[in-house]
Image (spheres, helix red, strand yellow):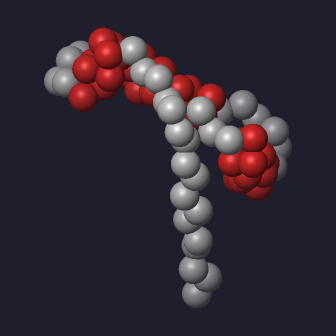
Amino acid sequence: MAVEVIETLTAENVQVNLKTLHIALGSYSFSPKDIARMAIVKAVRDGLSPEDQEKLAEYENRENPCGEEQ
């Protein structure tokens, strides 16, 4: 059985709007929470070092060989 290795990436100095973070952590309706989660993910992705951005791109290419946008 193959063992999947999960690599951890580090984003430093990530800035997220306080309201966005509050919405993501709170118990709001589906839509605002979803929007906040997307903003947090984008902030983390944008905060990755160039090396980690490259690792993420390589991982995404392996997981999505057809090149479809996720």
Total label count? Answer: 0
Which residue ends up furthest to the left in the rendered image?
Answer: 27
| Residue shown at the point (58%, 52%) measured from the top left | 9
39 relative to 48, above or below: above
The image quadrant of residue 19 is: top left
Task: Give coordinates of residue 4: x percent, y percent.
Answer: 58, 73
| Residue shown at the point (51%, 32%) measured from the top left | 13
Left or right, residue 61 beside residue 9? right
63 relative to 11, above or below: below
Residue 41 visible: no
Task: Give coordinates of residue 51: x percent, y percent.
Answer: 75, 48
Which residue ends up furthest to the bottom in the rendered image?
Answer: 1
- Residue nearest the observer in this picture, 26 or 63: 26
66 relative to 15, above or below: below
Residue 46 visible: yes
- Residue nearest the observer in this picture, 26 or 31: 26
Task: Give coordinates of residue 38: x percent, y percent.
Answer: 48, 24
Task: Give coordinates of residue 54: x percent, y percent.
Answer: 77, 46
54 relative to 28, above or below: below
| Residue shown at the point (61%, 82%) measured from the top left | 2
Left or right, residue 67 beside residue 28? right
